[in-house]
Amino acid sequence: MLAFIESTDHELSQQAVVFARGCLGPPDEGGDGTVSVVAVADGTPYAPAAWAQAIVGRIRESAPVVVLAPGTDRGNELLAHVAAILDLPLAANCTDLGGRGGEVATVSRVRWGGSLLEVAHVHGSRLLLTVAPHAVPAAPIEVPVELLTPDLAGAAAVVRERVEVSTAGVSLADAPVVVSGGRGVGSAEGFAVIEELAALLGGAVGCSRAVTSAGWRPHSDQVGQTGTKISPELYIACGISGATQHMAGCKGAKKLLAINPDAEASIFASADYGVIGDLHTVVPAISAELLKARGA
Ligand SMILES: Cc1cc2nc3c(=O)[nH]c(=O)nc-3n(C[C@H](O)[C@H](O)[C@H](O)COP(=O)(O)OP(=O)(O)OC[C@H]3O[C@@H](n4cnc5c(N)ncnc54)[C@H](O)[C@@H]3O)c2cc1C
């Protein structure tokens, strides 16, 4: 059982690292509660090597048996630095911690963009793990957060500015509903119907790589192995064939509705609901029904 701390504070969840001394997990599942959380102080510029040094210092002081970080770009990068400094193995994007005997731990982890679940033995006196995003249900835990202040003097690389891509609404990663378009949309302008339906459902617009390669949408909208991995309540895939690399990004969706005129398209094998038809007819019809139901 993996414990994973999710903060509603975006910066904190980016910066928090969890240390565990005893058995990790809630008390009713055998955990002994010796979990502590460290986070880099708010507003500290991101400097991977310097942040990792601060975490290493804390590891040397408190000698945790397990160190966890989120399986985000930043979490994976930070623990990779820590692993290199301490000469320890790192298991990234884990979905489960099966058990630990002596210095050997069994972990399950996501590989090949989510198309493979691997069970691996990790050897080491200390276990460094990152947790695959959305893979483990978050459990509330009350622990004080200890703030670290990395020494940035002499840091080889310091991130001075981050420019967020502006999204006119809910973000792709967190949206409860995602309406995605693929090559079948036909053009950048064709996304108007996708945008309208997403807005009506309070959701976000996604797309396949065929679409970003064509320049119809930015890469930040791409769902998949080399895009964003999402787990919305509802994923509506319009004009998407269902390639493995696309499905790696949306297999966490609770329900999948596929709209495609090709009844043989592989997306239908993963879909909970399917409409065999032209998205340019079906999507506006769904929007019109929603508006009618709302009396608009
Ligand atoms: C290393 C690697 C990484 C990759 N990473 C990603 C990734 O992160 N995300 C990703 O998406 N892909 C990724 N790909 C690409 C992936 O393999 C597919 O090529 C891509 O997903 C196909 O996109 P698509 O489904 O939009 O296009 P297509 O496969 O061309 O499918 C288009 C679909 O639209 C349907 N269609 C046509 N007209 C209409 C219409 N009027 N109405 C409704 N449907 C219609 C067609 O029947 C067809 O099924 C990756 C590939 C590689 C090799």
Image: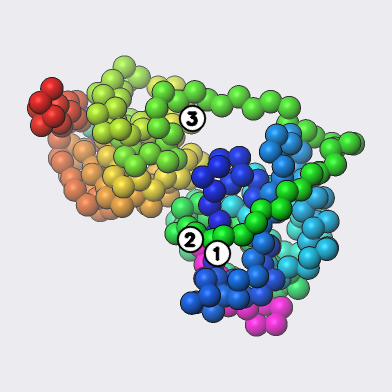
Circle 3 SS class: helix
Question: Residue at 78% across / 68% down in the picture?
Answer: 63
Nearest to the eye among marks 1 and 2: give it: 2
Report the amino acid beneath label 3: His
Please give the label number shown on residue 139: 2
Of callouts 3 and 2, the N-terminal one:
2
Span colored in magenta: 95-104
Residue 14 among those drawn in magenta: no
Amino acid at the residue labelled 2: Ala
* Residue 99 falls within the magenta-colored stretch: yes
- For the residue with label 3, is its CB less than 8 Å from the closest atom of ligand 1? no
Circle 1/circle 2 CB separation < 8 Å: yes
View extreme (right): residue: 154
Q: Which amino acid type is marked by label 1? A: Ala
Q: Secondary structure at mark 2?
A: loop
Separation of residues labelled 1 and 3 (CA atoms): 32 Å
Q: Which residue sits at x=26%, y=33%?
A: 201
**Circle 3 residue:** 219
Q: Identify the residue position indicated by label 1 in the image.
A: 3
Q: Quadrant of residue 154?
A: top right
Give the prevailing secondary structure in the magenta stretch: strand
Structural distance between the alpha carbons of marks 3 and 2: 32 Å
State whether residue 198 is above or below residue 151: above
Q: Is residue 50 left or right of residue 116?
A: right
How packed is label 1: few (under 14 Cα within 10 Å), some, or many (20 or more)? many
* Residue 78 visible to the viewer: no
| Image quarter hosting the C terminus | top left
